[in-house]
Image: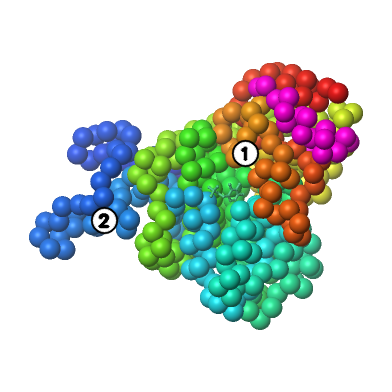
């Protein structure tokens, strides 16, 4: 599938040619661990063992590389497995990395509780403040970790400016593109070296699979990552890869609806007397609005808001949800509500990354907007 085709054409066809033996239009689910060899070393299409490669996973990896406009896509068992493989590929004991002050809680836990024990040091920085980023570099800094928009505070970082800063200091820039999805933002085209995804979220899109991905900008980095993917072993299983591939086909239409609904929800919440602030990059008053408008083709389906009534009010809003479902995760077709302080981000409590207790996060789904607004209206009623 040529790169000249549009996004949704590539989402449906890249890596997904009809099966050469049967003509099956959908990539078959190859439930096999091993492959018959035609004589010792006589591999058919390079397949020998499914940790190293599986045709269903290959299809997903090619689709991911195409959508992010990268050289190499790699699919993992979870977003955190992808992160672990990336961090241990590009960092050695004694190295240092810069991470966002409001990084996803699981990313912070991996870096502070696991990587730290292996002698890798980190500095949390507000990535929206480029002077603070510049000041955080050490001679040992090998990686800048960026998330934009961030989870759950919807902070925006300038990917092109961070790529330039990282490269000036001999470091790589990794961007966790989970919130935007490649439909709205392609970090490699802005100078990033590698993109990270939790495919559990928008790429899968139906809350039925846990998965992760890396897309490298160059074949050289792609080879190093692929070596570690095979050596470390946390690959996506064939059925998981198949589900993500199916989700990807509708990514464009889903994201259009997610963000149309989220924009309406943001407008509704901004006017609501119980709400003290709405964190959504699509709002002109959001501090990252201009950068987001420049580097994204839309503002996405995630938003958070703070309650005048504090933590108690935030918990009450979550518990009254009817159309919204009180649950962790995000990016599926159904709308979710959660309390980051006690749920997804409980692991950062007491750290520099602690999130406010009066914060509620919404993953706005693709249901009818009137039903979502009516539910929010009753959730916010005192
Ligand atoms: C969920 C998430 C992850 C972790 O992915 P898993 O698939 O849960 O391992 C990483 N980054 C962001 C922004 C996420 O939302």
Which residue is labeled 1 in the image? 328
Where residue 49 is drawn, which disc sits there? Answer: 2
> In what quadrant of the picture does the N terminus appear?
top left
- Identify the colour scheme used: rainbow
Dot 2 falls on a residue whose secondary structure is loop
Q: Is residue 257 left or right of residue 157?
A: left
As rendered, which of 302 and 161 lies closer to the eye?
302
Position of residue 60 relative to residue 89, above or below, is above
Counting residues from the start of the chain, the first of labels 2 and 1 encountered is: 2
**Magenta segment range?**
305-323
> In the image, residue 190 lies at what x, y percent?
61, 58
Is 233 inside the magenta-drawn segment?
no
> In the image, residue 71 lies at what x, y percent?
44, 59
The image quadrant of residue 158 is bottom right
Where residue 194 is drawn, which disc sits there? Answer: none
Q: Residue at x 22, y 40 (%)?
A: 20
Q: Is residue 135 left or right of residue 368?
A: right
């Amino acid at each position: 599938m040529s790169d000249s085709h549009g996004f949704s054409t590539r989402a449906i066809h890249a890596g997904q040619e009809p099966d050469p033996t049967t003509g099956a239009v959908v990539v078959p689910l190859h439930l096999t661990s091993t492959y018959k060899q035609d004589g010792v070393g006589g591999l058919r299409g390079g397949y020998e063992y499914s940790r190293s490669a599986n045709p269903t996973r290959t299809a997903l990896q090619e689709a991911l590389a195409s959508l992010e406009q990268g050289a190499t896509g790699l699919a993992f068992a979870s977003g955190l497995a992808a992160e672990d493989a990336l961090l241990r590929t590009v960092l050695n004991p004694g190295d240092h990395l810069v991470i966002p002050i409001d990084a996803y809680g699981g990313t912070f836990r991996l870096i502070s509780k696991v990587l730290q024990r292996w002698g890798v040091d980190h500095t949390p920085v507000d990535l929206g403040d480029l002077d603070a980023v510049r000041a955080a570099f050490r001679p040992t800094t090998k990686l800048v970790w960026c998330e934009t928009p961030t989870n759950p505070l919807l902070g925006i970082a300038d990917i092109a400016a961070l790529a330039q800063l990282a490269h000036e200091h001999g470091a790589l820039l990794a961007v966790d593109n989970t919130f935007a999805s490649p439909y709205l933002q392609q970090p490699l085209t802005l100078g990033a070296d590698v993109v990270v995804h939790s495919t559990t979220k928008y790429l899968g899109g139906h809350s039925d699979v846990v998965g992760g991905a890396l897309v490298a900008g160059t074949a050289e980095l792609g080879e190093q990552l692929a070596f570690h993917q095979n050596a470390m072993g946390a690959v996506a299983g064939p059925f998981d890869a198949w589900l993500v591939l199916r989700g990807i086909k509708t990514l464009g239409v889903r994201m259009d609806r997610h963000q149309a609904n989220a924009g309406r929800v943001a407008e509704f919440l901004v006017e609501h007397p119980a709400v003290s602030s709405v964190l959504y990059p699509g709002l002109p008053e959001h501090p990252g609005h201009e950068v987001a408008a420049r580097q994204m083709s839309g503002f996405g389906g995630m938003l958070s808001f703070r309650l005048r009534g504090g933590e108690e009010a935030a918990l009450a809003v979550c518990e009254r949800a009817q159309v919204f479902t009180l649950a962790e995760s995000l990016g599926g077709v159904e709308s979710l509500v959660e309390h980051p302080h006690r749920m997804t981000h409980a692991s950062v409590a007491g750290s520099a990354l602690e999130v406010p207790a009066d914060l509620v996060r919404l993953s706005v789904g693709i249901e009818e907007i009137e039903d979502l607004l009516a539910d929010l209206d009753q959730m916010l009623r005192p």
